[in-house]
Image: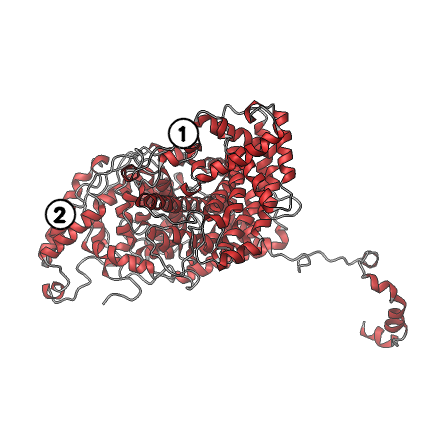
């Protein structure tokens, strides 16, 4: 019977060890017939796809091309509203300006017209206000009625966005957005409806679209921009980063909309637009991945740390993809057939002999003829049931994985040459190496002393010298050390000076509701995942894509199906990027801010959720064609719409892959790496949820960056998977050696590392949680009159302080004096004796 906790022979023990000792009879009942195995193989080949994936020419960045990012704001169901926006603008513009178009006006006349529009935004009539907002939206969309090409539309969209911001449009729309989110009448109306459609969120969609277009257009900096736009961009960035008049940051308003939507109080909120705007505001205010790299270099210089050995972005971009594993039948058939112990031993020697041919480490043939062990094929089906049971958010406590069934044995493998990364060594690794060496040669240890090498042989001296040459001290190490000193000596070190950066201000604002924000994002991610099954209690994320009248023809149904799939893909893309950006910025700002967010994501079952997302045909997901190019903005505003047919919709576009889906997969893998790195309890969760076969299937995608993060996730759990798994997956092990950074003394391939032993993982999480709470309490919960506040001992100074007294006290002051002072007898002798 399988372990109820999900750890069976396939998770931690080698094949064959899970059966009884009764020879072939004990395992014979578990073996499938040859016909059944062949059928299973055929089904697996069909599900995985037999077409070899070509190398994907994908360049990872902060976002897609400008036009693509703007087009994803609109669903195809919204396309008729482009004409409505244009009609509202032209109807109003003709009454104000005679005989000229918008592009023919001087800048002063354009600003004057925008001011008149903003004045009319304050009218009480809701319909009139919506018409004015649509006219402003038409300006932000690039006044496409007067343009001839798509490039012209994008140019005038940027120009008008800068103009609108300079006239105060963003502030005006922010007030309208606050008013709409607090509109209880609209919320109650949406709750009463059996089915919510696009019409229920019209006002919100117009407001969010204008704000998104302004943020996205102003955020980008191009070489051809006028000189004055840089100052406008910096002003806008400051306005979004630092709240004015003690108001909350704009990001917090968007997070509150997300939590309100997930709680069921506002089911009509257009979540895709809210999430896209949240992503772009976080990206604009905190900075993208290149900004993070620059901030990291700057912060290392502030802490007097040596510069980085390489630019990780450039290293990843220069890496080549490896060939995916080909699931052939020869090795798999031999492994699945019942074998005696002698045959099993001969097969193991044959595999080890094949390892000798890996000395050249040929990238093009990296995964050739690699077959997963039979446990993986069984786990692939079982894994989905395991993951489904773990995704009931808010209904479980912290997930603590059980102990692995065994510790793997050692096996010798040679390091390849020409590695892309410089190896790193932690201070902890040097101390651990010296502790073992001292116990072996001199019989005692010297604690954290890494300089005294007396009594140790010469080779140990050389080893320590090599380790110290590659020693890497991270910013997190310095921050943890400083935090320990502040906790130990609060009086002598004094109050910590915290720099009020945009990241620090955002964390302070999010702190008290951060668990709710993370859970809300994961709930929406779960609803948008392609592997999620429709449930009655799941949230409806399609409120801003479903039309009022459902399709009645096959063509309309196909178009709506593509629109819904595209809608979900965009939601996954925005949530994955928001979470990754927040984690990376918080980690750079302070390690315990990062750990606080990470722990709440783990407690909300983020790890099984991401694994559930990848438990599909990832190659099909990345090459999915859920887009209709002729309906994308700005193409649909310039060109006449051709006649759509079922064949043209099925054909899709000519792109090799879907940029947003590959971007989302890489971000989710990076997120999973962030959550599990150096956390053995969370690494065990990867083992318990049987992630190895799921991740291995993702290696079919020939993209270097995606493969790198998959291999990183496989590397951290190899020590728990058992020797037989490593023997059966030598090509994957070789790829890990070749592409993932090496940590000296990291015994990941053999399983003898002390950190791999199953200690009390719950204690590890509890200790981390205590450190996080101590940090948050010390920095953010400190009261004004704490016990460490200075005390004024001067009598004259204390009596001279001005106290704020209530107004009614002055009217009854004489009565109080008579009752509390004059009428109370004072025994002076007792008073003197007591002192």
* Residue pictured at 50% horizontal, 23% vertical: 224
* Residue pictured at 64% horizontal, 43% vertical: 122
**Quadrant holding the N terminus:** bottom left
When asked about the image quadrant of residue 78, the answer is top left
Which of 242 and 825 lies nearest the eye of the viewer? 242
Give the label, 1 or 2, closer to the camera. Answer: 1
Instruction: Find residue 612 and report its horizontal and vertical position in percent.
Output: 33, 53
Q: Is residue 819 visible?
A: yes
Is residue 307 found left or right of 437 in the rendered image?
A: right
- The residue indicated by pointer 2 is 329
> Is the residue 397 above or below the residue 508 in the image?
below
> Is the residue 496 above or below the residue 117 in the image?
below
Element type at mark 1: loop
- The residue indicated by pointer 1 is 639
Which of 214 and 401 lies nearest the eye of the viewer? 214
Is residue 511 found left or right of 376 in the rendered image?
A: right
Instruction: Find residue 589 and report its horizontal and vertical position in percent.
Output: 52, 45
When asked about the image quadrant of residue 386, the answer is bottom left
* Residue pictured at 58% horizontal, 31% vertical: 93
Q: Residues within 10 Å of mark 1 (few under 14, many from 20)?
A: few
Along the polypeptide, which appears first: circle 1 or circle 2?
Answer: 2
Which of 802 and 357 lies nearest the eye of the viewer? 802
């Amino acid at each position: 019977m399988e372990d109820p906790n999900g750890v069976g022979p396939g998770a931690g023990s080698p094949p064959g060890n899970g059966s009884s000792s009764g020879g072939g009879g004990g395992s014979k009942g578990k073996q499938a017939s040859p016909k059944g195995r062949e059928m299973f193989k055929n089904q697996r080949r069909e599900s995985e796809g037999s077409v070899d994936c070509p190398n994907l020419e994908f360049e990872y960045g902060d976002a897609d091309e400008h036009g693509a990012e703007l087009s994803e704001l609109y669903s195809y169901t919204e396309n008729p509203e482009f004409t409505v926006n244009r009609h509202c603008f032209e109807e109003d513009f003709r009454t104000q300006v005679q005989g000229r178009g918008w592009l023919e006006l001087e800048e002063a006349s354009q600003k004057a017209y925008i001011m008149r529009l903003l004045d009319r935004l304050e009218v009480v009539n809701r319909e009139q206000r919506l018409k004015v907002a649509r006219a402003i939206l038409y300006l932000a969309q690039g006044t496409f009625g007067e343009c001839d090409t798509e490039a012209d539309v994008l140019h005038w969209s940027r120009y008008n966005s800068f103009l609108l911001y300079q006239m105060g449009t963003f502030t005006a729309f922010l007030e309208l957005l606050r008013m709409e989110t607090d509109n209880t009448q609209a919320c109650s109306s949406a709750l009463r409806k059996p089915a919510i459609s696009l019409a229920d969120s019209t006002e919100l969609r117009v407001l969010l679209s204008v704000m998104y277009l302004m943020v996205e257009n102003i955020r980008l900096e191009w070489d051809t921009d006028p000189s004055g736009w840089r100052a406008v961009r910096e002003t806008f960035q400051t306005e979004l980063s630092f709240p004015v008049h003690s108001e909350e940051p704009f990001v917090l308003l968007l997070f509150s909309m997300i939590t309100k939507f997930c709680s069921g109080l506002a089911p009509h909120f257009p979540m895709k637009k809210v999430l896209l705007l949240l992503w772009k505001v976080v990206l604009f205010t905190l900075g993208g991945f290149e900004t993070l790299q620059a901030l990291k270099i700057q912060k290392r210089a502030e802490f007097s740390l040596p510069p980085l050995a390489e630019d990780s972005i450039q290293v990843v971009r220069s890496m080549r993809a490896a060939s995916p594993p080909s699931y052939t039948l020869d090795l798999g058939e031999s492994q699945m057939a019942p074998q005696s112990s002698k045959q099993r031993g001969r097969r193991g020697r044959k595999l080890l002999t094949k390892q000798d041919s890996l000395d050249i480490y040929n990238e093009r043939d990296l995964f050739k003829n690699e077959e997963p062990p039979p446990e993986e094929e069984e786990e692939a089906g079982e894994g989905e049931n395991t993951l489904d049971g773990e995704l009931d958010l808010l209904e479980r406590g912290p997930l603590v994985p059980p102990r692995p069934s065994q510790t793997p044995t050692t096996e010798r493998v040679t390091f390849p040459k020409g590695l892309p990364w410089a190896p790193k060594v932690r201070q902890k690794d040097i101390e651990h190496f010296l502790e073992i060496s001292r116990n072996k040669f001199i019989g005692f240890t010297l604690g954290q002393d890494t300089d005294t090498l007396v009594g140790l042989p010469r080779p140990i001296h050389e080893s320590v010298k090599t380790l110290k040459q590659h020693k890497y001290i991270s910013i997190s190490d310095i921050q943890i050390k400083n935090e320990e000193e502040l906790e130990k000596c609060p009086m002598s070190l004094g109050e910590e000076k915290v720099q009020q950066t945009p990241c620090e201000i955002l964390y302070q604002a999010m702190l008290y509701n951060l668990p709710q924000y993370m859970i809300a994002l994961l709930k929406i991610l779960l609803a948008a995942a392609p592997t999620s099954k429709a449930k009655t209690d799941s949230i409806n994320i399609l409120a801003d894509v479903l039309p009022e009248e459902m399709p009645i023809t096959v063509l309309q149904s196909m178009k709506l199906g593509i629109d819904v799939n595209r809608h979900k893909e965009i939601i996954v893309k925005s949530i994955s990027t928001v979470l990754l950006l927040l984690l990376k910025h918080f980690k750079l700002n302070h390690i315990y801010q990062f750990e606080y967010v990470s722990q709440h994501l783990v407690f909300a079952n983020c790890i099984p959720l991401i694994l559930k997302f990848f438990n599909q045909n990832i190659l099909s997901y990345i090459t999915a064609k859920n887009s209709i190019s002729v309906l994308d903005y700005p193409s649909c505003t310039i060109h006449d719409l051709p006649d759509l047919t079922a064949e043209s919709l099925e054909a899709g576009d000519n792109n090799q892959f879907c940029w947003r889906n590959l971007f989302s997969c890489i971000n989710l893998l990076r997120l999973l790496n962030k959550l599990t790195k150096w956390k053995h309890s969370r690494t065990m969760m990867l083992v318990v949820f049987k992630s190895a076969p799921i991740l291995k299937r993702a290696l079919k995608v020939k993209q270097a960056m995606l493969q790198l993060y998959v291999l990183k996730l496989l590397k951290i759990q190899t020590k728990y998977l058992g020797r037989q798994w490593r023997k059966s997956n030598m090509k994957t092990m070789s790829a890990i050696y070749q592409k993932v950074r090496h940590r000296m003394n990291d015994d990941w391939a053999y399983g003898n590392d002390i950190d791999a032993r199953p200690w009390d993982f719950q204690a590890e999480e509890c200790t981390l949680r205590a450190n996080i709470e101590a940090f948050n309490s010390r920095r953010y919960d400190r009261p004004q009159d704490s016990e460490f506040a200075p005390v004024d001992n001067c009598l004259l100074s204390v009596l001279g302080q001005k106290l704020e007294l209530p107004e009614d006290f002055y009217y009854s002051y004489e009565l109080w004096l008579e009752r509390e002072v004059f009428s109370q007898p004072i025994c002076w002798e007792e008073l003197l004796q007591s002192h």
